[in-house]
């Protein structure tokens, strides 16, 4: 039976930072996560993390993971299926094993939202993509569209403009009010990028692969690739089964200590009801969550 | 103990098309985090399925491999294609736990 003081679920910025703090607090801990780096691992560029003015999400992830490994933090790549409260422990069932932990930090992040339109599923991998950093290179001299208007959509468009011949950004609002002005400025300088506002994609069509999209404005655009970047939704299954209080799916935490309404369970990063979903806030919450776990464990000993 | 094989434009015919056992070819790239996360699971599966299924990895960043990526219409990675008797019979797109992949492979080829 594998018993830990602390198990951190999620290996994105919040979970990894919680791990760095847990290591320095000398806790017996483990990180269980599916995708190292989580949301940032697929970010084209991160330019607002102190000391990093221009780093790919991939590189930043690598650095944080290296930092954790230097402190001998352990990450296992497994999927958590269920968490149950037992007497003095939480039992965590993954796709491989059972683990037991006195304290848990949930840093499980969000899942990318899908468009839910005809053609989206059918053309997955045949022109429909959810990861511009993974797939941009396959669209050399092609015509593509990014769907969405937030920071992730705009950075995806900037990356695609390095490879593709033409990049449309299709957005339902009439301007990019959600994105950072610094990104918008860069986007406006790039003449391969053409925003199409006040529009929703109704259908993705093609034969063997994507050939175009139909918009709700009646417009039809011929293109080779569609990158869906319309935001993300919190993962709710775990919080529901544990009776953790949420607000629109986001875990309600006490901002002083990252506690949830369940004793011994803390939450950090994009899964919480914080106001700013960024690397730096995720890291900060991970640090606070680990500190709370450490202090509570100390009192119990 | 069989590790995954590196597939290139040079050995594609020998290792993939003329393979005696089914082979799963993982089209990947070093800039793709989900691809890197798929890596250890594929190494494990390669050992577990020794003799029944081979697993090859094709790096799409290498210029001489890009013809193959184009030929098999790779537009999203991780992209794993299953070949049997020289024919591509199934495609798996996206990161998934190795157990799920093993089940999906078992539906397409005999792994017993």
Image (cartoon, rainbow, N blue to C red):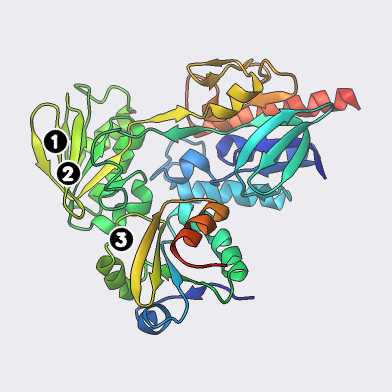
Secondary structure under tag 1 reads strand
The image quadrant where one finds the C terminus of chain A is top right
Mark yes or no: residue B19 visible.
yes
Residue A133 image point, x, y percent:
37, 49
Q: Callout 2: residue from which chain?
A: A
Secondary structure under tag 3 reads loop
Residue A265 image point, x, y percent:
70, 24
Q: Callout 1: residue from which chain?
A: A
Query: Is A236 left or right of B73, judged from the image as shown?
Result: right
Foreground of the two, B83 or A16: B83
Q: Are marks 2 and 3 on the same chain?
A: no
The image shows a total of numbered marks equal to: 3
- The answer to whether residue B57 is above or below residue A231 is below
Query: Is B91 left or right of B51, judged from the image as shown?
Result: left
Q: Gap between marks 3 and 1, in whole Å?
A: 24 Å
Q: Gap between marks 2 and 1, in whole Å?
A: 8 Å
Q: Which of the 4 quarters of the picture holds residue A23?
A: top right
Q: Callout 3: residue from which chain?
A: B
Query: Is A1 left or right of A188, judged from the image as shown?
Result: right
Residue behind mark 2: A205
Q: Label 2 crowding class (10 Å Cα cut-off): few <14, some 14-19, many 20+?
A: many
Foreground of the two, B85 or A161: B85
Extreme residue in the right direction: A301
Q: Residue at x 27, y 32 (%)?
A: A184
Residue A157 image point, x, y percent:
27, 42
Q: Is mark 2 in CB contact (under 8 Å) with mark 1?
A: yes
Q: Is mark 2 in CB contact (under 8 Å) with mark 3?
A: no
Q: Which of label 2 and label 3 is nearer to you?
A: 2
Residue behind mark 1: A214
Secondary structure under tag 2 reads strand
Sequence-wise, the earlier of marks 2 and 1 is 2
Residue behind mark 3: B74
């Amino acid at each position: 039976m594998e018993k830990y003081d602390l198990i951190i679920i999620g290996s994105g910025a919040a979970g990894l930072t919680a791990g760095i703090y847990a290591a320095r607090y000398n806790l017996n801990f483990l990180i269980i996560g599916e995708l190292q780096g989580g949301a940032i691992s697929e970010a084209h560029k991160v330019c607002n993390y102190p000391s990093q003015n221009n780093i790919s999400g991939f590189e930043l992830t690598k650095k944080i993971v290296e930092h954790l490994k230097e402190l001998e933090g352990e990450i296992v790549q497994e999927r958590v299926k269920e968490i149950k409260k037992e007497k003095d422990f939480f039992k965590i069932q993954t796709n491989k094993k059972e683990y037991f932990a006195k304290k848990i930090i949930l840093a499980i992040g969000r899942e990318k939202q899908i468009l839910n339109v005809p053609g989206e599923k059918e053309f997955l991998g045949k022109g429909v993509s959810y990861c511009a950093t993974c797939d941009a290179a396959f669209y050399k001299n092609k015509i593509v569209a990014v769907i969405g208007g937030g920071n992730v959509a705009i950075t995806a468009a900037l990356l695609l403009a390095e490879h593709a011949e033409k990049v449309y950004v299709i957005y339902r609002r009439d301007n990019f009010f959600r994105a950072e002005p610094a990104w918008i400025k860069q986007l406006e300088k790039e003449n391969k990028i053409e925003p199409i506002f006040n529009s929703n994609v109704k259908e993705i069509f093609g034969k063997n692969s994507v050939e175009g999209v139909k918009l709700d404005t009646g417009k039809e655009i011929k293109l080779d690739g569609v990158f869906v970047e319309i935001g993300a939704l919190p993962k709710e299954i775990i919080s529901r089964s544990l009776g953790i209080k949420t607000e629109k799916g986001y875990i309600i935490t006490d901002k002083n200590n990252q506690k949830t309404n369940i004793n011994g369970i803390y939450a950090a990063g994009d899964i919480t009801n914080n106001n700013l979903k960024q690397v730096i806030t995720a890291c900060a919450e991970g640090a606070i969550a680990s500190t709370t776990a450490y202090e509570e464990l100390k009192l119990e000993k | 103990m069989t590790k995954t094989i590196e597939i290139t434009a040079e050995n594609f015919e020998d290792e993939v098309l003329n393979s005696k056992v089914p082979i799963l070819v993982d089209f990947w790239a070093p800039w793709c985090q989900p691809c890197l996360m798929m890596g250890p699971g594929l190494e494990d599966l390669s050992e577990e399925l020794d003799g029944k299924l081979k697993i090859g990895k094709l790096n799409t960043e290498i210029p001489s491999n890009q013809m193959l990526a184009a030929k098999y219409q790779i537009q999203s990675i991780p992209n794993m294609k299953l070949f049997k008797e020289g024919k591509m019979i199934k495609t798996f797109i996206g990161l998934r736990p190795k157990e799920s992949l093993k089940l999906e492979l078992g539906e397409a080829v005999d792994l017993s």
